[in-house]
Amino acid sequence: MTSHIIDADIKVKWPEGQSAYSPASAEELMLIAVDLLVKDLGNEAARSFVDQVFERYTHATSDAQAAY
C-alpha cells in the first residue's frame, strides 16, 4: 500500500446552509464524496454512480490479485 497525504479544504453551499470538510485520508474523502452524492442525487442515483466506479476497477483488481 502506498503512503500519501491529502490536503483538501472542501466547502459546499446548499440552499439550507453550507458545509465544510477537511479530509485527512482517502477513506474520509470517499465518505464525504458519497455523502455529497447522496444529498445531491438521492440514494439510487448515487448508488448507481458508485457501482459504475467499482465496475471500472473490477477487472484491474482481479488481474492484480491473480498476479499474486
Image (cartoon, helix red, strand yellow):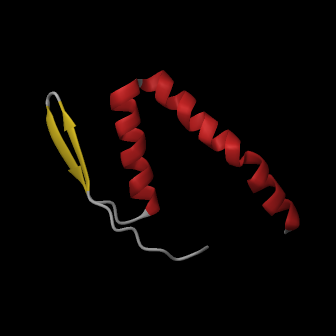
Depicted 25 relative to depicted 2: above or below: above
Position of 9 with respect to 35 (left or right) is left
Quadrant hosting residue 8: bottom left
In the rendered image, the residue lying farthest to the right is 67
Position of 38 with respect to 62 (left or right) is left
Q: Position of residue 16 (x, y in %)?
A: 14, 29
In the rendered image, the residue lying farthest to the left is 17
Depicted 7 relative to depicted 16: above or below: below
Q: Position of residue 35 (x, y in %)?
A: 36, 39
Depicted 33 relative to depicted 63: above or below: above
> What number of labels is visible?
0
Give me the residue at 84% from left, 69% from top: 68
Give me the residue at 86% from left, 60% from top: 66
Judging depth in this view, the residue of 68 and 46 nearest the camera is: 46
Position of 16 with respect to 10 (left or right) is left
Give me the residue at 79% from left, 62% from top: 64
Q: Position of residue 45 (x, y in %)?
A: 49, 24
The quadrant of the picture occupied by the N terminus is: bottom right
Depicted 23 relative to depicted 37: above or below: below
